[in-house]
Amino acid sequence: MRLENKVALITGAGSGIGRETAVLFASEGAKIVAVDINDAAGEETVQMIADAGGEAIYVHADVSKETDAANMVRVAEETYGKLNVMFNNAGISHAQDDDAINTTVDVWDLTMAINVKGVFLGCKYGIPALRRAGGGSIINTASFVAVLGAATPQLAYTASKGAVLSMTRELATIHARENIRVNALCPGPLHTELLMKFLNTEEKRQRRLVHVPMGRFGEAKEMAKATLFLASDDSSFTTGATFMADGGITAAYVTPE
Ligand code: NAD
């Protein structure tokens, strides 16, 4: 078991990457603090873990709200006595996110509040808890669009993920000597609700797949496995990494036929 005696807080644990990671971490021995704004979905994740014999609690928190972020960490420490792993994963890709001309200021602000401020607040309250535990691992979910421009415009999202990536590097540098590692998971396009809602026509989906050497969307389960590596001691010399799990999309200039 790779996370025995560890306590992991996972935001966006009600769906997609967050849920799969919560279930996998629990099966590897971690106690899970599952955070979401969708209470039914978050509770369902906890039930899935309990059904498999694991341990988890659900905490309602909007990661963009400071009081909620402080509270989720407080509940984690109060319930399980410590916090070892912080997975700042909650994020949105707004259906009206577009190019600079067509993206409204409201869509921009909402995206930044959840995707960027949410990660900042997770670190603001998570890092002191990891210090109290003698160190730990933070994983922030960025995206391949943090390093590549997408032809299907989603300007606010792309900018938000760039911010997550640069924030991750600086946090990794600042806290490296405190036994706190900070890495960015950069998923490629995934077969999840979030992306399928955004790429809402077959044409848009095929347009995206043209760029993926593996020729398919990734699965949330595959991101959970990458996150497990970053959370566990298997990655003990890895910090500040731009960890691509993207089917080769960022490696390719021309993809195979
Ligand atoms: P998802 O929509 O399946 O799950 C996201 C979860 O976050 C949901 O349960 C939602 O309720 C929760 N959430 C939304 N806003 C929240 C808030 N303010 N506070 C707390 N929880 C909130 O998405 P996913 O595909 O699993 O994506 C997870 C992360 O991965 C996101 O940061 C996303 O940007 C990133 N990502 C996804 C893809 C992809 O193709 N799906 C690719 C690259 C990166």
Image (cartoon, grey):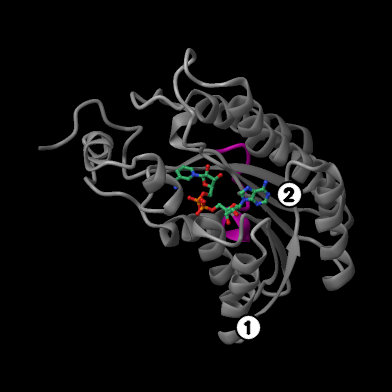
> Nearest the camera: 82 or 20?
20
Q: Earlier in the sequence, mark 2 or mark 1?
A: 1
Looking at the picture, which amino acid does disc 2 mark? Asp
Looking at the picture, which amino acid does disc 1 mark? Ala
Q: In this view, does 75 lie to the left or right of 208?
A: right
Residue that appears at 67% across and 43% down:
182
Q: Is residue 149 left or right of residue 10?
A: left
Task: Indicate yes or no: mark 2 CB to ligand 1 under 8 Å.
Answer: yes
Q: Quadrant of the N terminus?
A: bottom right
Q: Name the element at disc 2.
A: loop
Q: Is residue 236 magenta?
A: yes
- Is the residue 202 above or below the residue 229 in the image? above
Residue that mark 1 sits on: 50
Q: Is residue 111 left or right of residue 213?
A: right
Q: Position of residue 120 (x, y in %)?
A: 74, 37
Q: Position of residue 105 (x, y in %)?
A: 62, 20
Which range of residues does the magenta coloring cover?
231-241
- Is the residue 185 above or below the residue 37 in the image? above
Residue that mark 2 sits on: 62
Q: Name the element at disc 1.
A: helix
Q: In which quarter of the image is the C terminus?
A: top left
The quadrant holding residue 47 is bottom right
> Nearest the camera: 204 or 96?
96
